[in-house]
Image (cartoon, coloured by chain):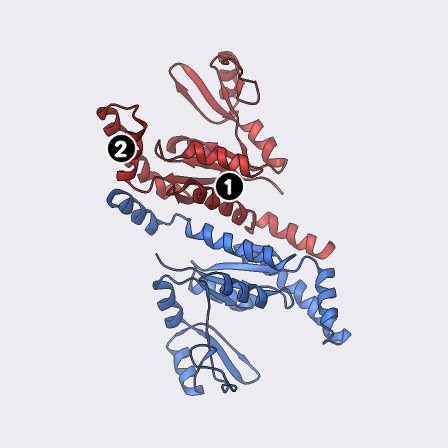
Chain colours: A blue, B red
């Protein structure tokens, strides 16, 4: 059976990174490896941390429609390779991608069977407290982050699932249940497989 | 938040009864109480085992479109009251109904947000063995049951989820995950609620 492609979005400080890492640790889900044109940092391994590409390779891949989505950040490019994701999924591997609301919308259009999950902090107040606690942001930056969070959350209507991250262990359990339930979904293709297997097994 | 209406179907001897009872025991899910025109047996309580109705009351309720579905068996009528299910759901209670493929299709049409779950024995061979093991059926009856199972399983394509009952404890876990995941679903109504609660909490 094919694997699931899951996309996790949500405001910064919602806990997306922790959720994905914990899920990878506790289950067979794999975190999707991005392609990038930035230089590898010491210790980073091609195919594990990133697929490192030259600008020319990256542009050629864009032209060949080889990315699920791609962005540019400070002159460096990042993208998700269609070929990589498709080979993982067809081998039965469940994949998780951490991506912003714009990227998620692009992936859903290209790959409608992907599952969009929105991770929420318990409240705007809690998000504010989390950012202040980190102590790395100026009051201006904090206010920017909060208004961005309010903007992002309006996109929740395009998502399949939402998880309120009150307690990370519970958010991980929510994810595990979503995965288990999605593997129990009846689709047109799968119903033929089920019937066949029921008759033959 | 409103409760979920779940409908479980599947061939006889798939384990629907055990699954529902176990789920009710381990969670807050309630088994839907049917209405019937048959006489109460000793010990049966109105509103707990059944809603006992006269033929006239039942027919009047049909005329008023008051049943989600209803059937007649050996001259006695059985049905699921819309008013009862709606009041349970709006109080936040998750409800489970054990019903055949025809009844499930009727409920889904009337109540599209209900969740249809198909419970399968591991295989036709396993189903055969289970029925033989019970020792209550003639070879002719067994063969009838198996062909009915093959007929019923063709309806799986209309279901939202399927569960293969290899081990009842695992089937119960599957159900619990489906319920938890369904409560994490984003719907148009819910996304407004989520945003409001995020801003206010």
From the viewer's perspective, is the residue at label 1 or at label 2 nearer?
2
Give whichever of A155, B160 is nearer the camera: B160
A30, above or below A179, in the image: below
Disc 2 is placed on an element classified as: helix
Q: Which mark is residue B146?
A: 2
Relative to B40, is A165 above or below?
below
Cα gap from disc 1 to disc 2, whole angstroms: 31 Å
Answer whether residue B110 is visible to the viewer in this image: no
Label 1 resides on the chain identified as B
Q: Residue at x 52, y 44 (%)?
A: B179
Q: Which residue is mark 1?
A: B113
Q: Quadrant of residue A137?
A: bottom right
x, y (%) of residue B166?
37, 43
User: Residue B161: image x %, image y %?
Assistant: 42, 45
Pick the front one: B200 or B166: B166
For this rendering, which residue is in front, A158 or A40? Answer: A40
Other residues around mark 1 within 10 Å, as few (<14) / some (14–19) / many (≥20) = few
Q: Tell me the number on the disc at residue A31.
A: none
Which element carries disc 1, helix, strand or loop? Answer: loop
Q: Is residue B180 left or right of residue B1?
A: left
Image point (43%, 65%), residue name = A110
Q: Residue furthest right?
A: A139
Quadrant location of the N terminus of chain A in the rendered image: bottom left
Label 2 near label 1: C-beta < 8 Å? no
């Amino acid at each position: 059976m094919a694997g699931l492609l899951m996309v996790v979005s949500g405001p910064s400080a919602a806990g997306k990174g922790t959720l994905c890492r914990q899920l990878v640790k506790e289950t067979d889900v794999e975190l999707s490896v991005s392609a990038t044109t930035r230089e590898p940092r010491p210790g980073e391994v091609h195919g594990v941390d990133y697929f490192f590409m030259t600008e020319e390779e990256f542009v050629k891949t864009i032209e060949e429609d080889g990315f699920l989505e791609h962005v540019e950040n400070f002159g460096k490019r990042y993208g998700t390779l269609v070929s990589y994701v498709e080979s993982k999924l067809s081998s039965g591997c469940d994949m998780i991608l951490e991506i912003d609301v714009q990227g998620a919308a692009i992936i859903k259009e290209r790959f409608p069977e992907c599952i969009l999950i929105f991770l929420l902090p318990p409240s705007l107040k809690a998000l504010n407290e989390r950012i202040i606690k980190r102590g790395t942001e100026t009051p201006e930056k904090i206010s920017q982050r909060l208004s961005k969070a309010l903007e992002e959350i309006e996109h929740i209507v395009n998502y399949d699932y939402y998880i309120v991250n009150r307690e990370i262990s519970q958010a991980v359990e929510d994810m595990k249940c979503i995965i288990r339930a999605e593997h129990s979904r009846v689709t047109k293709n799968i119903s033929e497989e089920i019937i066949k297997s029921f008759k033959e097994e």
